[in-house]
Amino acid sequence: MVQHDQLHRYLFENFAVRGELVTVSDTWQQMLANHDYPQPVQNLLGEMLVATSLLTATLKFEGDITVQLQGDGPLSLAVINGNNQQQLRGVARFSEDFPASATLKEMVGNGYLVITISPKEGERYQGVVGLEGETIAECLEDYFVRSEQLPTRLFIRLGESDGKPAAGGMFLQVLPAQDTQADDFTHLATLTETIKAEELLSLPAQEVLWRLYHEEEVTLYEPQDVSFSCSCSRERCAAALKTLPQEEIDTILEEDSEIDMHCDYCGNHYIFNAMDIAEIRTNADPADPHIH
């Protein structure tokens, strides 16, 4: 059985082109677990999750990448955040249900894609690209052409594996400052495009690469695990509560007897009662966490 949720980097020996292959099926399912998204929104988040994982793998430093869709359509926001350890999370906000056939444009309307790169050390970078393409993959390819002038292709596949929804993808990019013939890159992209969802989502990486590139020399590197991870915590919520006016907190406590802080990403609820708030105000740690 294939090991799910791993990212594999690979390099072509005879071409200045690098590749990545990822499966994010378990991560995708965990991301959706506490949400009731319509199928087209689930699929869109799956595609964005694959794309963000592949983009995060291009980081040469410790830090984060956020890929965010915004628009004036019924889907006002879809965002995936990932870091160099391939820890990913995501959420979407929408105002109405969608037919199963809803396209990216029908969901987002007039919108754009924002890619934010945040290294732990150094300058934050943000790139914005209009939704010219029909798919997330096309929009991101457009982004790379505009921002880095590097020929790049993304191949995203959604399907099933072991009877469960599954997601994966592949990424090809010309190495910077290398003299690569356009025909060579096109040749490799044409081969990669033939990958079927069931192959990508159920076969080991070595076998996928053999099926696609058996006439080429390819070096496959050690894989990196991909996982769902949310950075929310009771401590962060307590820190946020400290920044609110005391009267506002007291009013909520009077009306509801507790403060319920909900994480959009993972669905956790952090509950603070009057005693917890008193301890936060005296800078003590809140008492036993009330979390569900």
Image: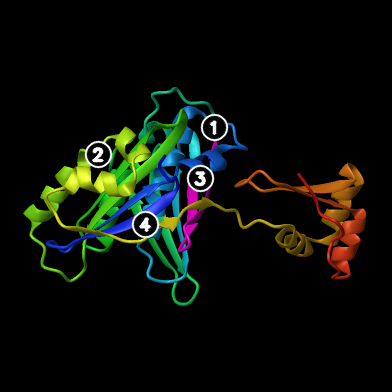
Give the extent of the magenta segment.
78-95
* Nearer-N-terminus badge (4/3): 3
Report which quarter residue 8 is drawn in: bottom left
Amino acid, disc 4: Leu
Q: Which residue is mark 1?
A: 37
Secondary structure of the residue carrying tag 3 is helix
Residue type for callout 2 = Ile
- Residue count near mark 1 (Cα–Cα under 10 Å), binned few <14, some 14–19, many ≥20: some
Identity of the residue furthest to the front in this view: 1
Q: Amino acid at mark 1?
A: Tyr
Q: Position of residue 189 (x, y in %)?
A: 17, 48
As measured in the structure, the alpha-carbon distance from the residue carrying label 3 to the one carrying label 1 is: 16 Å
Task: Say if residue 131 shows up in the picture.
Answer: no
Q: Nearer the viewer, residue 88 or 81?
A: 88
Marks 3 and 2, the one that precedes in the sequence:
3
Question: Marks 1 and 3: in contact by CB < 8 Å?
Answer: no
Q: Which residue is mark 2?
A: 195
